Amino acid sequence: MIGVSGHVGYVWEALRHGADATVVALASGSVGEELAPLAAACRELGHQPVCFDDCERLLDACRLDGVVVAPWFGDHARIACAVLARGIPCFVEKPVALTLAELAAVQAAQARAQTMLMPMLGLRYDPAMFTAWQTIRAGAIGAVRLITAQKSYRLGTRPAFYQQRATYGGTIPWVGSHAIDWMLWLSGKQPRSVHASHSCQHNREHGAMESSALCHFVLEDEVLAGIALDYLRPSSAPSHGDDRVRVVGTDGILEVRNNRLYLLSDQAGGERELPLENPGRIFDDFLGAIRGERQPLCNHEDAFRVTQACLFARQSADEGRTVCW
Amino acid sequence: MIGVSGHVGYVWEALRHGADATVVALASGSVGEELAPLAAACRELGHQPVCFDDCERLLDACRLDGVVVAPWFGDHARIACAVLARGIPCFVEKPVALTLAELAAVQAAQARAQTMLMPMLGLRYDPAMFTAWQTIRAGAIGAVRLITAQKSYRLGTRPAFYQQRATYGGTIPWVGSHAIDWMLWLSGKQPRSVHASHSCQHNREHGAMESSALCHFVLEDEVLAGIALDYLRPSSAPSHGDDRVRVVGTDGILEVRNNRLYLLSDQAGGERELPLENPGRIFDDFLGAIRGERQPLCNHEDAFRVTQACLFARQSADEGRTVCW
């Protein structure tokens, strides 16, 4: 495991539930990352990893079946490239890169290695979201025409590296990547253009971190998608995040809200809540894919497409202009 | 009353509940509009209006305290100008114009006449929406930062004039005007730019009528607003429309959904539903304003601002470029 700043919880959760994997080595991924909490979490679960002070040394010293990459966000690409260069399957935090040049480097490294690169698009594994995808694929709402999605987060106390673009990357890539992934995944459409805006106003002393953002995507076949992001969810809210997506099709409307799924269609006889399917845990999916036992729910193509869409949207917001594919 | 194609129901509803007004004359507003249903509705309520075959003749022949203008949407501006030119208060369907040139003509006519021009922004009178506005004005969510709004309609059977841009005007002006009004009204902010898209695909043989649209507004102080519109609500839905608005502020989040109002804020101790205030009926507001008894909830400035924002958004969608104020 390299890095402690992303969703390493995906790993703990699977290990705690009996995933057949052993953490053999740890390293910080970014200068300034504290390794101690990660080492303590490993020991708590009965693992005795060797700790390295440099991730390249870790990669050279150990025989590994897979690497979890979750450093500061500006280090995803460099470390993913180092892992892929050694032909090791890589479970990497999204977005996999914070610049288009970094993205191209990761793409090239993956193409050379032909090794698995699986992004931490963990919200695909939310049962409501997963069932929404299944339901759309089964044709329950006809052709997708309009998508709106939302991520609204409590700000809480964020690590200092969130305050700088170079280490954080921006709220559109970090928070928005999930919603942008839903848009692409649920619609099955390629993006054509994006117009986005973001604002750092009222970010409560969080430097360059944007506290609100809005993205306007046009996908192929004139499918439209709007994505709203904020860190303004009050601390007294009943949950950390308020994730929502609404997909309007020619034959029905599907909506995820409060981790529940609602279908409105004539065929369903009006509005009803759907029972949810559970796709399992994302880290189990990674392990299963390493072992060749299954196709994971997200792969390198998803990682690249989502990252590119995030970076195009961020560029649009930074430059105040529409960015086209 | 001139025209039968807009929300003349606002008038019937008030008359049925005892509004002190008499319909003295009727005329079609557009070539092809059928006057008979309007005349029948008047007689049903005990009014005996004189029917004219030309609205200019009506305006010249009658002594009127006010005129209701609701013809095909491409005739709003011409008829509103004719009413204002005679110094008569005008209750006019929104948007008041379908082109910027028409809008300028109505603005000039109103400025010359200094007469009341009240737009049919009837959804301001929805108790949930009205209470949302009051709640924001009272400071319950702090500074507004991000707004998302939605209008989702059943298509049903639309009159033929909806199928042509010249008579219908477009889905952004017709359906979107309400949501664009909420955005401006609830935020109290001026618009700075708009980027919009719309699509006629899957409009079920409705010619040039757009069946989906998405608008991305940036308001002053980097307040962001996204508006999603569609005519794809299934016919088996529990209501004709699914109007929603969510306003994210620095101190709380306010949401209107299913004609109910929800506040989430630390000061409110989390999430709670708010009791609603009823502002009364829009046509009663018009009558009261004519009599000088009250300030109406919407006036000519709202009409002009909303119409301009609609036309800028439609232009953006038509031309595929951002339009700035």
Image (cartoon, coloured by chain):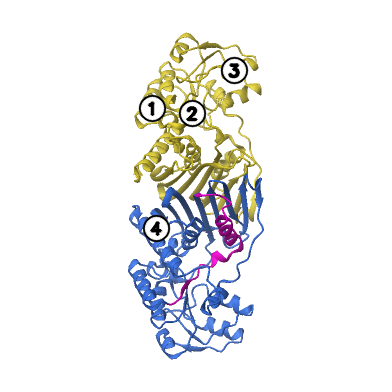
Chain colours: A yellow, B blue
Q: Are marks 2 and 4 on the same chain?
A: no
Q: Whole-percent x and y of residue B150?
A: 52, 55
User: Circle 3 is placed at which residue position?
Assistant: A21
Q: Under tag 1, what secondary structure? A: helix
The extreme top residue here reads A61
Look at the image and give the residue range highlighted in magenta: B115-144
Q: Earlier in the sequence, mark 1 or mark 3?
A: 3
Count neighbours of disc 4 (C-alpha within 10 A) and say few if under 14, some if 14 to 19, many if 20 or more. Answer: many
Q: Amino acid at mark 2?
A: Ala
CA–CA distance in space, label 4 to label 3: 54 Å
| Discs 3, 2: same chain | yes
Query: Which residue is identified by label 2?
Result: A160
Give the residue type at disc 3. Answer: Ala
Mark sitting on residue B25: none
Mark 2 or mark 1: name the one nearer the start of the chain.
1
Residue at (45% x, 21% y) in the render: A30
> Is residue B123 one of those drawn in magenta?
yes
Residue beneath disc 1: A107
| Viewer-side residue, B28 vs A28 | A28
Q: Is residue B219 visible?
A: no
